[in-house]
Image (spheres, helix red, strand yellow):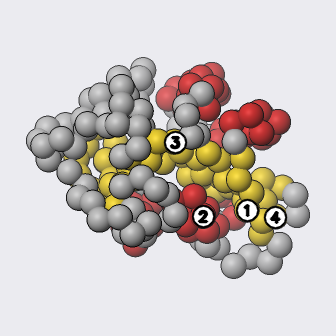
Amino acid sequence: MIEGLQLRHYSADEAEEILDQLVDLYLEVYAGGGEFYSEDRYRRQLDLHMQRAGWELVTATVGGALVGYIYGFPLPAQTRWWEGIHEPVPPGFTEEDGTRTFALSELLVHPAWRRQGIAGALHDDLVNDRTELRATLLVRPDNIAAQAAYHSWGWSRVSRLQPKWKEAPDFDVLVRTSNSGATASIG
């Protein structure tokens, strides 16, 4: 682990204070990624996600500087998360009740701080003790480094999803069952 690395949890209200820092890091990580990775779209995404019940952010700082973060939220019963999923998926896979699935929406680390264990520390801090039966995330199929990391952390690919957002790429749908001791299937 990196000397001086500090992880901190934020609620949506607390995260308002560092919103510009979150957006700035996102834009740096996805520089040159096209319209889908624009500041305007990401600010709208953050605003919508931060309104979700149970939204939680974990930041990683070194010497007070933001070097990475992760956030997510439990999927509500009436979620649009699964819109655009490719069939077939296991029966009942997209049914939610507000407590079944934690959606990991963003995990990013500044390029200068990658491959030092920060992403793994953020991931484990937010995901490992969740009470939901499973967690899900979307990752680009061509993001080989992220794919390898997620698979090493126990995630499995279930399907592919094409979000309805303008300029959105295809994503792989990954799922991981809870570490909280509950027994659950991913379907």
Instruction: Judge by depth and name the residue closer to the eye, 132 or 153.
Output: 132
Give, as a three-letter code, the residue at label 2: Asp
Amino acid under label 3? Phe
Q: Which mark is residue 7?
A: 1
Check residue 125 in the rendering and tell me which mark sits there, or answer none.
2
Q: Which numbered mark, 4 or 1, is in the foreground of this view?
A: 1
Question: Residue 62, labelled with which disc?
Answer: 4
Labels 4, 2: front one: 2
Quarter residue 118 falls in:
bottom right
Q: Of discs 3 and 1, which sits in the foreground?
A: 3
Density class for disc 2 (Cα within 10 Å; few <14, some 14-19, many ≥20) is: some
Lower sequence index among marks 2 and 1: 1
Name the element at disc 1: strand
Sequence-wise, the earlier of marks 3 and 1 is 1
Q: Is residue 43 above or below residue 172?
A: above
User: Percent position (x, y) of residue 62?
Assistant: 81, 64
* Residue drawn at x 42%, y 52% as measured from the top left: 132
Q: Position of residue 107 (x, y in %)?
A: 56, 52
Q: Please report whichever mark, 4 or 2, sits nearer to the chain's N-terminal start.
A: 4
Name the residue located 69 percent from the left edge and 79 percent from the top edge: 1
Q: Residue furthest right?
A: 63
Cα distance in 3D space between marks 4 and 1: 9 Å
Amino acid on which the number 4 mark rests in the picture: Val
- Which tag, 4 or 1, sits closer to the chain's start? 1
Q: Determine which residue is flagged by label 3.
A: 73
